[in-house]
Image (cartoon, rainbow, N blue to C red):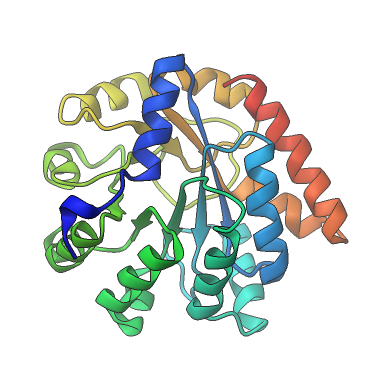
Amino acid sequence: MNMANLPINRIDMVFNGLRRRGKKALITYIIGGDPDIDITADLIVEMEKWGADVIELGIPYSDPLADGPVIQRASARALNRGIKIADIMNMVRSVRQVTQIPLVYLAYYNSVFKYGIERFVKEAYDAGIDGIIIPDLPLEERGEVFDITKRYGVHLIPLVAPTSHERIPKIVENAGGFVYCVSTTGVTGEREKIQTDIKAYMEEVSRYTDMPKAIGFGISNRDMVLQLKDYCDGIIVGSAIVSLMEKAESRDEALERVGQFMKNMREVL
């Protein structure tokens, strides 16, 4: 594949546009296939209407190390329904007929490796995926995946943590899209407050990269968004949305709950 022929990545276009308007990105996360693949497709379209700028789609995995109980249960529900990577690829391909919102896969390395790294990235690109996050991909093992994603113009999105420190320059080197800045140590999940010194943390990351920086893990209400938004280019909300869907008793109720929640978040961004 000729890099010169690749279109500009949708993630870059969105962040460039937001920067020009002085706005911050609202990045949302759901598990592909929870509670079913049709609702996932509906949610992508609706979340764009409610103000999402980028949507992360989790590939269900049996042992999601970085995820707390809410997302673990969502992964288990999707797997119990028999959801496969191919089903999610097909759903993304069909959703691309009606929306151009940037879409990112969050997948654990074992899923990508077993599927075939080149096959996974190529099919993701063909379906219309703009970026891939692999939370358990060690820095030292990243080379092959990075080379393949680069070839297809799909961003390999880096994750940094408050404990990354001297590893940050290597983590962000040659990566793309945005830097996923994990707000706190531990796993995903709604939190009452973030203990990390976010100002110092973001300043440290900014010393090594001009890429947009998005803060995720534990962001569950608009007060937290207000506290964090001045230090970053985007806010990532996952467990709070997945939890709302888990509590809903119907498709319409799930859409209504998520829509209202996102409206509250969007107002302060």
Which of 154 and 82 lies nearest the eye of the viewer?
A: 154
Image check: 160 left or right of 88?
left
**Can you tell which quarter of the image residue 105 is in?**
bottom left
Q: Residue at the spot x=28%, y=48% of the render? A: 158
Which of 24 and 70 lies nearest the eye of the viewer?
A: 24
Q: Is residue 90 above or below residue 171?
A: below
Which of 32 and 195 lies nearest the eye of the viewer?
A: 32
Q: Is residue 173 above or below residue 249?
A: above
Image check: 235 left or right of 209?
right
Q: Is residue 269 above or below residue 135?
A: above
Q: Residue at the spot x=19%, y=57% of the render? A: 150
Check the picture and name the quadrant holding the C terminus. top right
Q: Is residue 229 above or below residue 127?
A: above
Image check: 85 left or right of 7?
right
Outermost residue on the front side: it is: 5
Residue 200 image point, x, y percent: 29, 21
Q: How many labels were placed on the picture?
A: 0
Which of 70 and 144 lies nearest the eye of the viewer?
A: 144
Q: Residue at the spot x=49%, y=68% of the render? A: 59
Q: Residue at the spot x=78%, y=36% of the render? A: 260
Residue 174 image point, x, y percent: 14, 46
Residue 101 image point, x, y percent: 52, 45
Check the picture and name the quadrant holding the N terminus. bottom left
Residue 162 image point, x, y percent: 30, 37
Q: Is residue 125 visible?
A: yes
Q: Is residue 214 visible?
A: no
